[in-house]
Amino acid sequence: MSSTTISIPPSTATVSVTAFDVAEDPSKIVIPAVFFQPVLPGHEILHLPIFAFLIEHTPTGRRDFENASPAFIQSFKSLGAAMPIARDIVEQLEDHGVDVNSIDAVIWRYVGRDLSKFPASTDLVYGAATATETCTVNPASVLLDSDFAGRKSVPIKFDETSFEIGGFKAHDFFGDGSLYVLDVPGHLKGHVCALARVTPDSFVFMGGDACHHAGQFRPTSTLHQCSPCPAGILEATRRTVSAEHFTPLDAEGKTQVATAASIAMIGAFDASADVLVMLAHDWSLVPALGPFPTSLDAWQAKGYKKQVTWAFLGGVEPRLCIQPQACPSYFLISFTPS
């Protein structure tokens, strides 16, 4: 890799990654200000995409689905949030010509999705630290008995391995270096991300809910080495942008040392010219990568990284982009429950 800070074992094995936006129309996804702090003028409401990823492993023919559908919808309703989904991920997969019966596994980045439309033959993969008690045991749980009934559960036991990539404990999912599931603590217990090798030397980092805005892990001094900030943006933000005002929070609204550490390590991946970082709810990715679904296999050749790296600073979605002219002295956004 081009970055000396991340060491990934070499391999010629690859997977194919297709990104879906479960929301389809992010403008209809309404998240009130209660989900992040501090609240800045003009940032009272957020409209977010909800990315999901189809991962196809050619040598085995396996298809795995990195689940990115909205969690905790019921709790959102009480807060005035709205997440209308016209066509769920199963319907979108079928529209894309993928038979849901061909999905070998669903990888939960964290708990919260109804799996009832996936056949019992689809395994459920998750971090072993995930709380898996259902609502019949714990009324506050968002999990249903049907999520697990008749289905093989595959908890990844990161505490039993010393293998790491970029500071995160890693599980070689297919055993050939094409896909790694990473233990990324902080958002919720058991939260995982995925690192997919789409060519022998380029990768997609599926960041899930490790954070919710690119300004939480950008900029860094090493990022400028592979993706220099355009001179106009750099000059405009030189005296008005600060990276000291926001503390990352977990899904319970508590400051977590683990969250901050995870975000810093994601920044190291982002600083590599060979890694495209995709958060589950990053609106700044939509104009460059859409319409969805879209293949990410040739992201490097298509120049996606250059298009998206600095998009979060302005010109995409006013509620999400921190524009120095409108919001002096602010740079990072930190969210509470997601």
Image (tube, grey):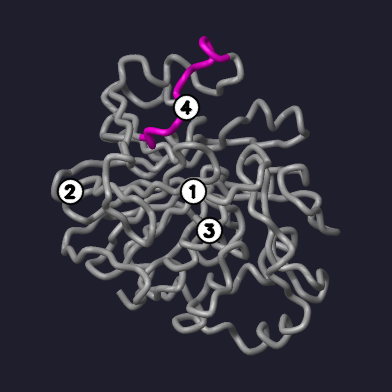
Tell which circle, 3 or 1, labels the residue nearer the N-terminal end: 1
**Is 206 above or below relative to 86?**
below
Amino acid type, callout 2: Gly
**Is 261 above or below relative to 304?**
above
Decide: few, some or many residues near mark 3? Use Cα within 10 Å; few <14, some 14-19, many ≥20.
many
Decide: few, some or many residues near mark 2? Use Cα within 10 Å; few <14, some 14-19, many ≥20.
few
Residue 131: which disc?
4
Amino acid type, callout 3: Ile
Secondary element at tag 4? loop
Q: Which residue is mark 3?
A: 263
- In whole angstroms, how far apart are the C-alphas of marks 4 and 3? 22 Å
Amino acid type, callout 4: Ala
Pointer 4 with pointer 3, Cβ within 8 A: no
Q: Quadrant of the N terminus?
A: bottom left
Q: Which residue is mark 1?
A: 208
Q: Which residue is most to the top?
A: 136
Nearer the observer: mark 4 or 2; the answer is 4
Q: Which residue is mark 2?
A: 175
Q: Where does the image place residue 63, in percent across and percent down from the top left?
A: 27, 41
Q: Which residue is most to the right?
A: 41
Q: Residue at x 51, y 82 (%)?
A: 224
Secondary element at tag 1? strand
